[in-house]
């Protein structure tokens, strides 16, 4: 997975109605079952480009192949105990994938073994 | 950063291979779209936040690998665990007999005051049952451990079990705290009254009534 801080496309925070003081203004929930993942204002908004495996892998993909997509907006969670409800997969390389604790949908983000920080992909959750 | 919770409890699921530890942690969702990707990697642990009598409690629930046998599990394995779910399979006599071995292993390797609970899982499979509910209860009485039959498949009593274990750990911690610095107010009785009210009723279910 490559990681690039993308300065050109860092969105203007003031224009994002779901970001306040650089943090998630709203509750972060599972797209599929509504399980509460993060309380309001507990995670930092970051614009980083990072690949994440697709939640729905094509059944006809090659053996052992993992289909991925680039995601460039995440909520950064410094300490795993900040999460309300979340699941961690077994490690793959330097990462554990984050999944919904209630319906197991995922990955909704990743956890970095080295830094012990977690990143939740904005495009894989809902906010309310 | 300020602590956003009152308690953090690490819980462990142990028991023979195949009794359903992973299924208790991992939702039974054969229809799940993502099952192929996430289930091939497997789940390490889950964090769940629950409300226990007005306190915010974080549960960190760990699965354990199937190949591990009680003979090979040592102190390092239990480090930091405050609660242990001992799981057997009601359709597997051997897994029930092994609960005693698991308990001995815990006594030898885990912290002395770790809270325990026995789960008789797969109680939905009544036609294949080898261990009666009464035998489960008897064992629990013998060791003075709480007991409930569960079905990971039907999500039966699973939540109840985690709430019960967490509540017991919390009660033990509060007792300890009170002992080390007695508070002028006696909050203990108040709490117990709350507990009664909050007790979920869903556990009075098919499996438990058998
Ligand atoms: N009918 C029924 N089947 C269950 C239940 N729980 C688990 N199973 C099945 O039992 C088998 C073993 O379940 P696992 O969750 O993998 O067991 P485990 O304890 O994690 O096993 P190891 O990882 O080898 O230690 C699987 O085929 C599950 O589908 C249950 O409550 N009811
Ligand atoms: Mg397992
Ligand atoms: Zn979900």
Image (cartoon, helix red, strand yellow):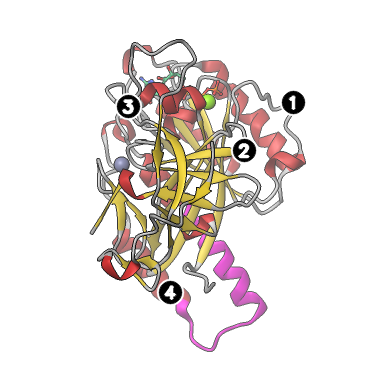
Q: Which labelled disc corresponds to residue B71?
A: 1
Q: Report helix, strand or loop for mark 2.
A: loop
Quarter of the image for residue B116 reads top right
User: In this rendering, do the residues under marks 2 and 4 share a single chain?
Assistant: no
Query: Is residue B6 shown above or below B15?
Result: below
Crowding at mark 3 (Cα within 10 Å: few <14, some 14-19, many 20+) = some
Q: Could you say where residue B25 lies in the image, as x and y percent from the top left?
A: 44, 36
Q: Secondary structure at mark 1?
A: loop
A35 drawn magenta: no
- Marking on residue A56: 3
**What is the secondary structure assignment of the residue under circle 3?**
loop
Marks 3 and 1 sit apart, C-alpha to C-alpha, by: 40 Å
Around disc 1, counting alpha carbons within 10 Å, would you say few (fewer than 14), some (14 to 19), or many (20 or more)? Answer: few
Task: Specify the subunit that label 2 lies on.
Answer: A
In the image, A73 versus B153, the foreground residue is A73
Please tell me whether residue B184 belongs to the stretch shown in magenta: yes
Total numbered badges shown on the rendered structure: 4
On the same chain, marks 3 and 2? The answer is yes
Of circles 1 and 4, the one toward us is 1
Q: Kindly report the distance in space between the C-alpha atoms of the residues bearing marks 4 and 3.
A: 51 Å
What range is drawn magenta here? B165-187
Could you confirm whether marks 4 and 3 are on the same chain? no
Label 3 vs 2, first from the N-terminus = 3
Badge 3 vs badge 2, beta-carbon distance below 8 Å: no
**A55, above or below B188, in the image:** above
Residue beneath disc 4: B189
Q: Are marks 2 and 1 in contact (CB under 8 Å)?
A: no
């Amino acid at each position: 997975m490559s990681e690039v801080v993308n300065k050109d496309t860092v969105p203007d925070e003031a224009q994002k109605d779901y970001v306040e003081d650089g943090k998630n203004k709203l509750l972060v929930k599972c797209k599929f079952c509504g399980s509460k993942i993060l309380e309001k204002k507990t995670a930092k908004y970051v614009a980083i480009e990072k690949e994440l495996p697709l939640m729905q892998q094509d059944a006809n993909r090659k053996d052992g192949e993992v289909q991925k997509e680039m995601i460039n907006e995440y909520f950064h969670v410094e300490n795993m105990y900040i999460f309300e409800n979340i699941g961690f997969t077994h490690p793959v390389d330097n990462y554990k994938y984050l999944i919904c604790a209630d319906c197991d949908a995922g990955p909704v983000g990743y956890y970095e073994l080295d830094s012990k920080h977690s990143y939740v992909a904005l495009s894989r959750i809902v906010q309310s | 950063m300020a602590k956003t919770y009152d308690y953090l409890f690490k819980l462990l699921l142990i028991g023979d291979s195949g009794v359903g530890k992973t299924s208790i942690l991992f939702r039974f969702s054969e229809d799940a779209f993502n099952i192929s990707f996430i289930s091939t990697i497997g789940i390490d642990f889950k964090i769940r936040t629950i409300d226990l009598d007005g306190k915010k409690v974080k549960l960190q629930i760990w699965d354990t690998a199937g190949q591990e046998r009680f003979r090979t599990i040592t102190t390092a394995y239990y480090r930091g665990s405050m609660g242990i779910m001992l799981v057997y399979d009601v359709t597997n006599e051997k897994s029930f007999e092994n609960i005693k071995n698991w308990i001995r292993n815990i006594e030898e390797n885990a912290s002395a005051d770790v809270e325990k609970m026995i789960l008789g899982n797969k109680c939905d499979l009544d036609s294949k049952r080898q261990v009666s509910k009464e035998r489960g209860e008897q064992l629990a009485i013998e060791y003075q451990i709480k007991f409930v039959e569960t079905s990971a498949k039907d999500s039966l009593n699973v939540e109840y079990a985690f709430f019960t274990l967490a509540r017991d750990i919390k009660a033990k911690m509060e007792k300890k705290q009170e002992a080390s610095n007695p508070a002028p107010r006696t909050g203990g009785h108040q709490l117990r009254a709350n507990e009664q009210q909050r007790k979920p009723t869903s556990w009075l279910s098919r499996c438990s009534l058998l």
